[in-house]
Amino acid sequence: MYPIVLNIHSILAYVVFLLLMVSIIRWIVKINQNATYSDSDKKWSKIVVMVVHTQFLIGLVLYLFLSPITQEAFSNVGEAMRNSALRFMLLEHITANLLAVVAITMGSVKAKKVAGDKIKFKKLAFLFSIGFILLLSRVPWANWWNLN
């Protein structure tokens, strides 16, 4: 079960990165075009947030129940904090990803609540960018590309 869920989590990460890149470019273009915030923009934002939340929930299942890495780290947290690879998975990866999900969600929520289309796009572009940077900063690249 673990390898299947881990592969889904890894594949969905590509989808999340692609959606965020397209979104950020989309919002920046719309800022520069003085575009109107439309229903399609709202739908796009919702889709991105739903995919990001789904990715986070799959990661949470891995983190709490399936991953032998986090299970090992949970068995001796003190030792895990001294081991950079275990600390990364136990603390850094989950924390940065949670903050990224919060930033992306806030972008979508704030865009609905502010007046002015340009401001909506700026909120989306800024907060989606923060989330994207946080996600990129804590991807376990070595594990992802089997570089260990």
Image (cartoon, helix red, strand yellow):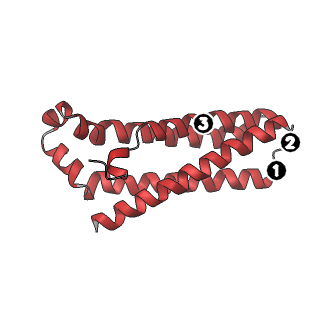
Q: For marks 1 and 3, give the one nearer the viewer.
A: 3
Residue lying at 24% horizontally and 34% vertically, measured from the top left: 84
Residue 112 appears in the figure = no
Circle on res. 35: 2
Discs 2, 1 touching: Cβ within 8 Å: yes
The residue indicated by pointer 1 is: 38
For this rendering, which residue is in front, 112 or 32? Answer: 32
Across and down, in percent, residue 2 comes to 28, 64
Across and down, in percent, residue 139 comes to 40, 43
Q: For marks 2 and 1, give the one nearer the viewer.
A: 2
Q: CA distance from mark 2 to mark 3?
A: 19 Å
Crowdedness near tag 1: few (<14), some (14–19) or many (≥20) residues, C-alpha within 10 Å: few
The residue indicated by pointer 3 is: 129
For this rendering, which residue is in front, 112 or 125? Answer: 125
For badge 1, the amino acid type reads Ser
Residue lying at 82% horizontally and 35% vertically, measured from the top left: 32
Q: Tell me which corner region of the image, top left, top right, bottom left or bottom right, holds residue 73.
A: top left
Discs 2, 3 touching: Cβ within 8 Å: no
Across and down, in percent, residue 81 comes to 20, 32
For this rendering, which residue is in front, 114 or 90? Answer: 90
